[in-house]
Amino acid sequence: PVDRNGNAPSMRLNFNIYNRFAQHIHDKPSSDNTSCSGGGGSIAVLSYDKRGAGKSQPILKDKNYFYKLGMMDLVADAVEAVKFVASHPRIDKNRIVLLGHSEGAIILPLICREITNDETSLQPIAGCIFYSGFGENLIDVMAFQRTTLANEVQTMSGPTGWILRRLLTKEYLDKKYNEFMKQVNDDGEPDYVSLMCGLVKQPAKWVREHASYSAEEALSKHVTCHCLAITGQKDFQVRNEYCTRETAKGLVPNAASVEVHRPPNLTHLLRSMEGEAKMMNMKKDYKEMGKLPLDEVVMEITYAWCDRVLFEKQ
């Protein structure tokens, strides 16, 4: 699992997305040299380890704890995080923004719904920032990734390409997915399933809850705040087509405002890269990108949006 900094220690992958974002957004001076937020204000950032990741571990050790969790557990944790922030004496509870990246962006509408339905008088969310995960759900994303991988393999040259074109076909990838979903949807409703002779575990409850979730419906019903959505054109993990103005307006018809961007060189790690982004090179490329600063364009867009939405600076 990925921790609150965006790192996966068990895989020795350090991306440092969220801690760098927090530092950037806190330190950035505004045009009047006060802060990113301007007008003498400042922005605090709360990030946390989701259950089973980083420091968020059960008192009684359970090596399968993370795999037993569902999507709605993650939503509930986000709501508790908002309650904590809203209770802080130095936080303006009328100006709280949710930021989600990847799966975090996908579940933002559900977090908005739960906050609206909460009985502790939480104020409506002021804004939502969707990084690399706007307009689709996990099942759509998985289908997109299978298609992307199969298409990429078809263009590979040399002996490796010849072999992979015969192994990693779209039909094979779909077959493995269907076998996996059969395990996930077993009558016993397992919390998790084991694959590859028990070497790999996947959270089944989490997948089932994602499969029953319609991002399009949730966006249209539950998102009424200001929205910023950014997905790069070199992000092969999610579609960037949803980040066009007309599409976005249709997805969040009740939003106070919606701003969308598709930076041409931006990847899923919120870093830009030259050359072609390939799924087969993901681990190598991502390791290198993790050493880079966050994309300047993304940060400048976010700074300007925060100034406008939180501090009414035009």
Image (spheres, grey):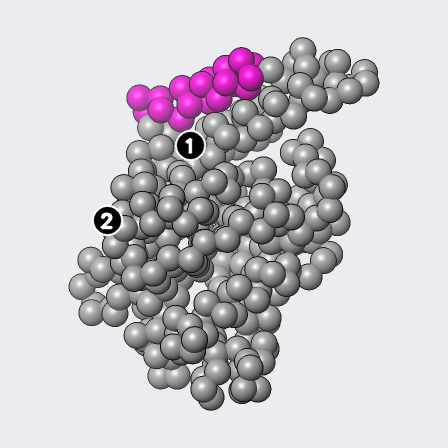
Looking at the image, which residue is at 81% across and 16% down? Answer: 159
Q: Secondary structure at mark 2?
A: helix
Q: Which residue is mark 1?
A: 139
Looking at the image, which residue is at 61% across and 26% down? Answer: 149
Instruction: Give the dominant element type of the magenta stretch: helix, strand or loop.
Output: helix
Question: Horizontally, is 6 left or right of 62 in the view?
Answer: right
Tag 2: Cα neighbours inside 10 Å, few (<14), some, or many (≥20)? some
Q: Which residue is mark 2?
A: 221
Q: In the displayed structure, would residue 88 be above or below residue 67?
A: below
The three-letter code of the residue at mark 1 reads Ile
Q: In the displayed structure, would residue 288 be above or below residue 171?
A: below
User: Over which residues does the magenta segment extend?
Assistant: 170-188
Tag 1: Cα neighbours inside 10 Å, few (<14), some, or many (≥20)? some
Looking at the image, which residue is at 54% across and 59% down? Answer: 4
The three-letter code of the residue at mark 2 reads Lys
The answer to if 183 sits in the magenta stretch is yes
Q: Position of residue 195 (x, y in %)?
A: 54, 25
Tell me the quarter of the picture where residue 300 sits. Answer: bottom right
Question: Horizontally, is 203 left or right of 28 in the view?
Answer: left
